[in-house]
Image (cartoon, helix red, strand yellow):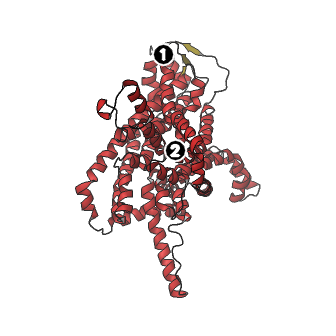
Amino acid sequence: MAIALLIALPLLAVLFLALSPSDDIWNHLIATVLGKYVWTTLGLMMGVGFGTMVIGTATAWLVTMCKFPGRKLFNWALLLPLAVPAYVLAFVVTDQLEYAGTLQVVLREIFGWSSRQDYWFPEIRSLPGAIVVMTLVLYPYVYLLARAAFLEQSVCVLDVSRTLGNGPWQSFFKVALPLARPAIVIGMTLALMEALNDLGTVEFFAVNTFTSGIYDVWLNMSSRSGAAQLASVLLIFVLTLIALERTARSGRRFHHTSSKYSTLACYRLRGPRAALAFLVCALPLSFGFLLPAAVLFSYSLNFYAETLAANYFQYVLNSLTLSSIAAISSVLIGVFMAYGVRLNGSPTVRAAARFASIGYAIPGAILAIGVVIPLGIFDNALDRFLLATLGISGGLFLSGTVVAVIYGYTVRFLALSYGTMEASLGKITPNMDGAARTLGHSPAATLRRVHLPLVRGSLLTAGLLVFVDCMKELPLTLILRPFNYDTLATFVFQYASDELIEEAALGALTIVGAGIIPVILLSWNIVNSRPGQNQDSRLKVTR
């Protein structure tokens, strides 16, 4: 309950500040930019939601149910764009596709065009450009869950579909897709939450969403209450998104009706169909990972000296320090909460645990406002106490320090560690707890000597996921970091915003590299998650 209250403080602070008197900035926002924020945010959500659903579901079905050249590579490689922050891809795409970029320069040389008036080229820095960039790096959320859902489906239901006269496409739309629908919807929800949290891409593309508006109102207009009011509206967007996802599944149940699991029957594709399947999988991988990785690697080789001179190693140290501490604290709190729910699964305790893990659904810009307020109240109260008792001023103890950043990281990413540990502990039979207690072990000793050794793989996975997300996190870090304290994310964002993407390439490549290891682990876990996956079944469907 105490942890739930601590995690809830930022959200409660935002709501309190939003209801407090403001300097009439809300009327100004309504008259000028609020409508644009609403429609732009809705457009971004619709575009990213549709794009991630189509790409993620299509690629997941192809690599799971079809055999074609490159399938084994695509199995894990399609997750690699998850390691690329959206703002990094935005910088690379703009650098390559804008008027002075490589592509347009080559086109002008080939066709003899002399100016922009001689030809048409889509505007990169626009809402459609932001949708494409975010879709390319967020579709793995849908792919990840959709593929796991397809792998978990029983052979029997697909066999029955075939015996009833359904072809591959009919079996997909009538059987496999409805069964995977909950996983696909959850993947889309996660992708949309990340899109709402994005600041770097929308700022760089000059797309006015609620997140960029919060940042602008707070830091440029110096209005915390106005920023809190915008944050409250964005919070309504997020809660509505979660409610719609749950309402869409209400009254529906998706069950596996057979325990027969064996290697899934695969449709062998040949000729044009195999080429088309390869192209469908290769395009998002190429533009979402291979292109930015190749460009960043090339720039890093040519401009590494400038990057090193810009205090690169200090930025790496700062990022590693903040991310490591946040990962450790999130895992420890996640283990404590999940084990507490296991020991006392009352509705109150479960509700507190679920509420404490809501931070992942809240955009970083909102959490940043919420973190500053309670920490500022604490610092001011402590300063008044020191002045009254000792006659000295303590200044700011927590606000504007790394403590605020770590607190924000922990609140936002606690859901990752708690969810992972809850699922892992749920797989351990309660009989093991009873056996340990009869042997004289206390609950703490049982956790230390029995449960933790059994879930150490999940502990590592949870820590890695939190670590990588902290390395990429931009809005929270930009707002909460101390003065003259930069991480790799803020360093890359500031340099790329100043059109110095070449000098920031090594930093961006470091962030991408840090995300590759957990992506590979996730892919390995999915491949080995299907019951009967290792059975010696040779069932094939040749097409």
100 or 485, which lies in front? 100
Q: Residue at x 48, y 33 (%)?
A: 287
Q: Which residue is mark 2?
A: 502
As shown in the figure, which amino acid type bears the numbered disc 2?
Glu
From the top left corner, tell me how far across and down residue 120 is, in percent.
31, 31
102 or 458, which lies in front? 102
- Numbered label tally: 2
**124 up-or-down from 365: above or below:** above
Q: Which residue is mark 1?
A: 273
Whether residue 372 sits left or right of residue 233 in the image: it is right
> Label 1 to label 2, Cα distance in Å?
40 Å
Whether residue 138 sits left or right of residue 302 in the image: it is left
As shown in the figure, which amino acid type bears the numbered disc 1?
Arg
Q: Is residue 466 visible?
A: no
From the top left corner, tell me how far across and down residue 35 is, in percent.
26, 50
Q: Does label 1 or label 2 sit earlier along the sequence?
A: 1
The residue mark sitting in front, 1 or 2, is 2
Binning the other alpha carbons within 10 Å of mark 1 as few (below 14), some (14 to 19) or many (20 upward) gives: few
Whether residue 84 sits left or right of residue 453 in the image: it is left
From the top left corner, tell me how far across and down residue 274 is, in percent.
51, 17
Secondary structure beneath dot 1 equals: helix
Secondary structure beneath dot 2 equals: helix
91 or 160, which lies in front? 91
